[in-house]
Image (cartoon, rainbow, N blue to C red):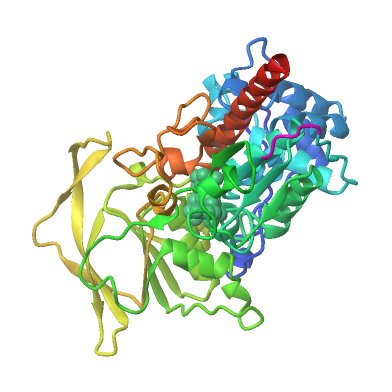
Amino acid sequence: MPIKRADKTPMPQRAAEERAKAFVEVNQGYTQYHAAFEAERCLRCQDPVCVDGCPVKIPIPEFMHAIAIGDMKEAAKILRTANPLPATCGRVCPQESQCEAECHLVKRFDPVGIGHLERYVADWERTQPPTVEANITRAEKVAIIGSGPSGLVCAGELARFGYPVTIYEALHAPGGVLRYGIPEFRLPKEILDWEIGLLKRLGVEIICNVIIGRTLTLDDLFGRLGFSAVFIGTGAGLPQFLRIPGENLNGVFSANEYLTRINLMRAFQFPDADTPLRVGKRVAVIGAGNTAMDAVRSALRMGAEQAMIVYRRSEKEMGARVEEYHHAIEEGVEFHWLHNPIEVLGDETGWVTGLRCQKMKLGEPDESGRARPILIEGSEFVFPVDNVVLAIGTTPNPLLVKTTPGLGTTNRGCLVAEEATGLTTRPHVYAGGDAVTGAATVILAAGAGKRAAQAIHRDLSRAAETAATAS
Ligand code: FAD
């Protein structure tokens, strides 16, 4: 199909029937032809508002220009100065509501495919010998708790400033949600491993299987381990439940457990991998955010014959990225909007057999600004299902706060931290990402990690200058 200059160059994709039963990556990436054509669509505006829409402030027009003239080395260099996770962000960031939403072209046409081009450049860089090298010039050590995007980006930025950085991660592999939540068919783990590998080349040390608040306390990091500053990027990994009857039946999962078994523990490779996942023929996933979409599409790939989304609001209120929603429709996922689950039904052996729902209609907006779902009397019915997966949200895990005196939290259990710097209520302790905002996005977490790294650098530099003047 000829590409029109007004439209964003479409991302080549694997056919739905080919991909819906396998964990292979759906999006195939631009070719050089696509990339040059798309980069040429950038107007190189005097006032590049797209950069304001990017939480890590990628110099977008400069990197577009480098692609357009075929200088891939320069394009990769520009990207890497702003974002140590471009191959990841190019795949999973909601560009449509960030940089691309600001693009001047959207007034009349499609925006430039900034995200697709970010991915293209990062994938090109992956074919080249690595150019990043460690250059540790500072004596002060910085500890990072959690290896999700906020922690990784904070670490990368601090390493670029010359600090020795150690990341402590509770799980046995780094990456946070990028590792345990987002499936292989959207973000292949070899891509994540490559980006983390480059951070290690920059000198970042990653120590897994350490829970700060259990294995070590935050005060151990300052005390016996001698760190000068700490960044907390522990995310929001505690699943919420509906508190409806039957939620404890066998075959009911939180989306976190479901996806962790598949992604981190590689249940899709069972029995070659150790962890199994019992997937029934009919799977209902409750919720309509990115997590729900990943769970329902994974269910199909794990062998479910019928995989459905059950959501009490409408398509309009869905939180998932539009691209993921379209992919799910193409793959055969069913969508049951305006359905409110009220009970999980089971048999005498304790296994799920059905999901009792009520039908809803939409009313006036509620406190979240979204139309309030209202019950339609007498509309109860049962979906026969074998699995129910709850993807209705997560909150920060309270473990670290409970074991660390002086860390302030909001009434939603999020850490209190200054927006511009990430400074918490304890001196030299910074925080960012989902642990501060509640469940949000990869790029917002990355932006918070970057701002905190810059604030840590300012504070440690000031302290070093004061010490030098005093001596
Ligand atoms: P996380 O990624 O949650 O990482 C926190 C890390 O800290 C974890 O590895 C955890 O094990 C570790 N940790 C926690 N406590 C401790 C402790 N006490 N000691 C040591 N380590 C600890 N966003 C998008 O932009 N696009 C998407 O397509 C998208 N899809 C998503 C799909 C799913 C299934 C989920 C769950 C989320 C998705 N998101 C998406 C949201 C995005 O992944 C998160 O907003 C982002 O990962 C938050 O980053 P973070 O660094 O704050 O925390």
Q: Is residue 357 left or right of residue 166?
A: left
| Residue drawn at x 41%, y 39% as measured from the top left | 407
Q: Which image quarter: residue 388?
A: bottom left
Instruction: Tell which residue pokes out farthest to the front in this image.
Output: 471
On the question of residue 28 being in view, the answer is no
- How far from the left and from the top, in percent, is residue 332? 48, 63
Q: Which part of the image, by quadrant, shows the N terminus?
A: top right
Q: Is residue 276 left or right of residue 401?
A: right
The front one of 126 and 260 is 260
Q: Is residue 426 above or below residue 65?
A: below
Does the magenta-highlighted stretch encompass residue 396? no
**194 sits to left or right of 47:** right
Q: Position of residue 95 (x, y in %)?
A: 57, 35
Q: Which quarter of the figure is the C terminus placed in? A: top right
Q: Is residue 62 above or below residue 260?
A: above
Please name the residue shown 59% across and 65% down the image: 264
- Residue at position x 58%, y 46% from top? 221
Q: Is 138 part of what is drawn in magenta? A: yes
**Magenta stretch in the rendered image:** 137-141
